[in-house]
Image (spheres, rainbow, N blue to C red):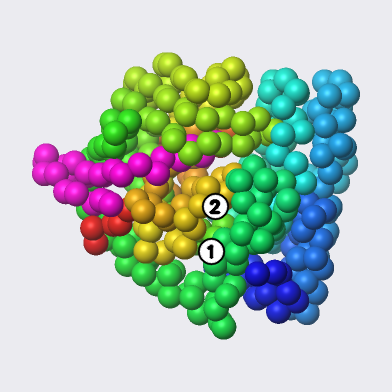
Amino acid sequence: MKFTRKKLEKYADVLWWGLTTARKGRFKKGDIVLLRFDLPALPLAEVVQEKLLGLGMNVVTRALMNPTMEHNFYKLSNTSQLTFKVPGEKELYQALNGGIYLYAPASLRHLKDVDPKRIGKVAVAKKYLRDILNKREEKGLFGWTLCMYPTEALAKEASLSLEEYSVQVIKACYLDKREPVDQWNSIYKEATAIKKWLNALPIQDLHVESDNVDLKITPGQQRKWVGISGHNIPSFELFISPDWRGTQGVYYANQPSYRTGNYVEGVKLLFKDGRVTRAYADKGQEFLIKQIRMDKGASRVGEFSLTDKRFSRINKFMANTLYDENYGGRYGNCHLALGASYSDTYAGDPSRLTQKKKERLGFNDSALHWDLVNTEKKTITAILKGGKRVLIYENGKFKY
């Protein structure tokens, strides 16, 4: 199954659905949309640009560095070059109304010999741009979405042929359907009902149990479950940014993870009083520990997520977090993210969520956001205020 012109047009339609669904405010002609893409995604980028221009958007295009250029940047740059702020970039981000990122890596391991501290330094230096967009999003001035375009590098790391990999992408995004946007609207409606049910429960804590996980998550005050909001294509997860201070116990990620050219497998995290006190990995432990030490918030939880297998058609490991965190398969998945929290999980007006209030409510702040996925058979029990226990997730499905 290949990406024909027709499927690329359907993909562009779904991305526009994602972008308009993700933004609280409406798009209007003349709005500025930043279209960033890895070079292998050029066929899709051309079709997306064409659609955006036809809708009256002002499209700013940015082709990202290829593996050689990115490796050169991290290996050869001095500290000043690593933290260099591009003139005009701040002003551009302050004016953006939309952002679309087409992820299509030509390599997943080209940065494996780069010191993670150098990569972390860049992430910290660019955090101010993310903060700008977060504030604009909270005010309804900005929306974003992203997707993935298949490459030989991704297929190889997932031990699939490019055709097999492409089939998973096409199925996951419902591009094999006559009207994929109708499918997404249907999923959005069902997910909205589940979120309404979850948000009506007076949950004090969540107890996550599997063969290798025994973890307590504290949702915290003034929180709400969100997800399937258009931000990621595909996305089937419902998630919350918990009060990081209540995290206790053991978490295990049985799905491997690729991050900035590094491969990490079999991650085990021990939490006490909200922080990772011990971290182990069967592969990539040194990298794992350096990431957790990136900044003060990198050892804390910023997100907890559940995927219902009835929505997701993804049933293979894809060597890509966007897909692996939305894995359906036999038992669905849960994942937690170390690092930054999401302000849209605040039950009030996110634009009024000041830094001081975030700290008081236990929203985490970090330059890191790293999703770590568990696909084991598991149960999630909600401990309600008053002590009652309610099973909310079992065998990959919400008990709604």
| SS of the residue under disc 1 | helix
Q: Nearer the viewer, residue 132 or 197?
A: 197
| Left or right position of 308 against 339 | left
Q: Amino acid at mark 1?
A: Ala
Q: Amino acid at mark 2?
A: Tyr
| Left or right position of 111 against 230 | right
Categorize mark 2 by other alpha carbons within 10 Å: few (<14), some (14-19), many (20+).
many
Q: Residue at x 37, y 30 (%)?
A: 251
Specify the label residue 172 is tagged with: 1
Residue located beneath label 2 in the image: 323
Range of the magenta residues? 370-395
In reply to whether residue 280 is colored magenta, the answer given is: no
Q: Residue at x 36, y 53 (%)?
A: 330
Categorize mark 1 by other alpha carbons within 10 Å: few (<14), some (14-19), many (20+).
many
Kindly indicate whether the residue at mark 2 contacts the one at mark 1 (C-beta within 8 angstroms).
Answer: yes
Where does the image place residue 384, in percent across and percent down from the top left? 17, 44
Specify the label residue 219 is tagged with: none
Where does the image place residue 284, in percent across and percent down from the top left? 58, 23
Q: Residue furthest bottom?
A: 178
Where does the image place residue 101, in percent across and percent down from the top left? 70, 55
| Left or right position of 341 against 251 | right
Residue 23 vertical placement versus 343 (above, below): below
| Left or right position of 68 against 102 | right
Q: Residue at x 75, y 23 (%)?
A: 113
Sequence-earlier tag: 1 or 2: 1
Q: Is residue 150 visible?
A: yes
Residue 26 vertical placement versus 115 (above, below): below
Q: Is residue 28 visible?
A: no
